Amino acid sequence: MISWINGDLVDLWQINQKFFVLINCQGIGYEIQILESFFLKLKTNQISNKNITLWIKHIKKDDSDLLFGFASKEQKNFFIEILSIRGVGSQIGIGILNKFSISEVINAIKTQNKKLICSVPGIGQKMSDRLILELKSKFKSEIQFSEEKSKDEFEIKDPEINKMIEDLQLTLQSLSYKKNEIKTILPIIISEIDLLSKKENNLSFENLLKLAMHYLDKDSSNLDR
């Protein structure tokens, strides 16, 4: 059973909507299917270090051994949870994570957005119903946390800080971060404003921008950017 791998990138290729890497790990080449976002980062040299680490889900079949690689343990665990649902195969699981971040899927479950789930190739109405029902149970705590964040997300009374947050969003967008990713980390930034305010000269646009980029770049190595 292979659960994690670190090695040098030898090759990468695409077959239809499947994306692969070949990794040399101690003289053995491992062919691994990866997410499109990670594939594009490698292809466009956004990841300069060709020594890469992937969390692996090893699926053993009668006629083959399949390896699926993820940039984070969270992605791997989410993939495993999706596969535990009756009728959902590995390519549908990969398709979900190719199209949406984990937070987007959890939000779709919370809002019962069947249209969004059905936009993934291979998922019809019945499967979307089953996915929402079963994932809602599996990710109950994450959905509750998301709802709590939504309630507190923009409860800022200070107009100066509100303006700073607005400028922060625009600046991050100009730096090519996606809107949904920015929205995801905003509650975290807002929750730390009080802490920054208590530190002398620490609450500034520059510090908020550094903090936001820290969280976004951290997510970028874990989730899809």
Image: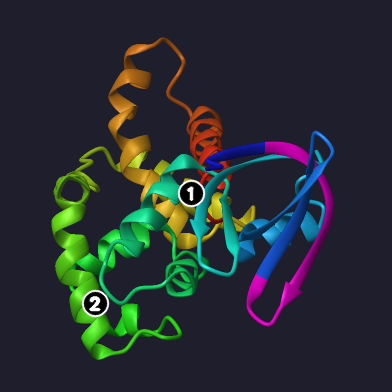
Residue 16 seen in this snapshot: yes
> Residue type at mark 1?
Asp
Q: Position of residue 206 (x, y in %)?
A: 56, 31
> Residue placed farthest to the top in the image?
200
The residue lying at 80 percent from left, 38 percent from top is: 49
User: Which one is closest to the eye, mark 2 or mark 1?
Assistant: 2
Q: Which residue is mark 2?
A: 113
State yes or no: residue 21 in magenta.
no
Let me know if residue 10 is in the magenta part.
Answer: yes
At which x and y percent is residue 112?
A: 18, 74
- Name the residue carrying label 1: 167
Residue 69 lies, with reference to residue 54, above or below; the image says below
Q: Nearer the viewer, residue 58 or 40?
A: 58
Residue situated in front as seen by the camera: 106 or 148: 106
Q: Secondary structure at mark 2?
A: loop
Badge 2 vs badge 1, beta-carbon distance below 8 Å? no
In the orientation shown, which residue stands out farthest toward the front? 62
Between 101 and 167, the one lying in front of the other is 101
* Mark 2 vs mark 1, CA separation in Å: 30 Å
User: Which residue is at 60% across, 66% downward?
Assistant: 64
Magenta portion: prevailing SS class: strand
Region in magenta: 6-18
Q: Amino acid at mark 2?
A: Asn
Tell which circle, 2 or 1, labels the residue nearer the N-terminal end: 2
| Residue lying at the far bottom of the rendered structure | 125
- Neighbour tally class for label 2: few under 14, some 14-19, many 20 plus, Cα within 10 Å: some
